Amino acid sequence: MASYPALRQLLRILGRAEALAALGCADEPDPATLTPAQREGLALLVDAAGANVASALVAEAAASDDVTGRAAGLGFVRDRLAAFGDLLTPEQAAAVLALAEQRTADWE
């Protein structure tokens, strides 16, 4: 189960206003209370914006003082994907990771 901060991060990456509209909410809900319809709306946004999610996570990794190379950067991305938990399907997480791997290919 994803945490509230993980949901907030994902909504920020997807575009808060558009993501909240897809969820039918004015504010970020508790991830545990998302309905199947809300999860479907979120999944559609992630499918459409997978490249943006990967780019945002790679940019956050690059800005992190703890990331000193490609392996650490990809570890950072994997940790964020794990934190998103069930907010992403396994296929979405794999696709975002594959894009992150491409975007960090020249980091070493």
Image (cartoon, grey):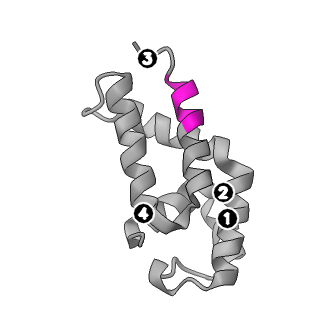
Kindly identify which residue carries mark 4.
6
Kindly identify which residue carries mark 3.
107
Residue sitting at the far left = 66
Label annotation for residue 90: none
Mark 2 and mark 3: Cα distance apart in space: 26 Å
Label annotation for residue 43: 1
- Up-down relation of residue 46 to residue 108 (above or below): below
Secondary structure category for the residue under label 1: helix
Q: Quadrant of the C terminus?
A: top left
Q: Is residue 12 visible?
A: yes
Magenta-drawn stretch, dominant element (helix, strand or loop): helix
Of mark 4 and mark 3, the one earlier in the sequence is 4
Residue nearer the viewer, 28 or 103: 103
Mark 4 and mark 2: Cα distance apart in space: 14 Å
Give the crowd class for mark 2: few <14, some 14-19, many >=20 residues within 10 Å: many
Residue 6 on image: x %, y %: 42, 63
Give the crowd class for mark 1: few <14, some 14-19, many >=20 residues within 10 Å: some
Mark 2 and mark 1: Cα distance apart in space: 5 Å
Q: Contact (CB < 8 A) between labels 2 and 1? A: yes
The quarter of the picture where residue 27 lies is bottom right
Q: Amino acid at mark 1?
A: Ala
Q: Is residue 104 left or right of residue 71?
A: right
Secondary structure category for the residue under label 4: helix
Q: Quadrant of the N terminus?
A: bottom left
Kindly identify which residue carries mark 2.
46
Q: Is residue 7 left or right of residue 37?
A: left
Residue sitting at the far front = 90
Mark 1 and mark 4: Cα distance apart in space: 15 Å
Of mark 4 and mark 2, the one earlier in the sequence is 4
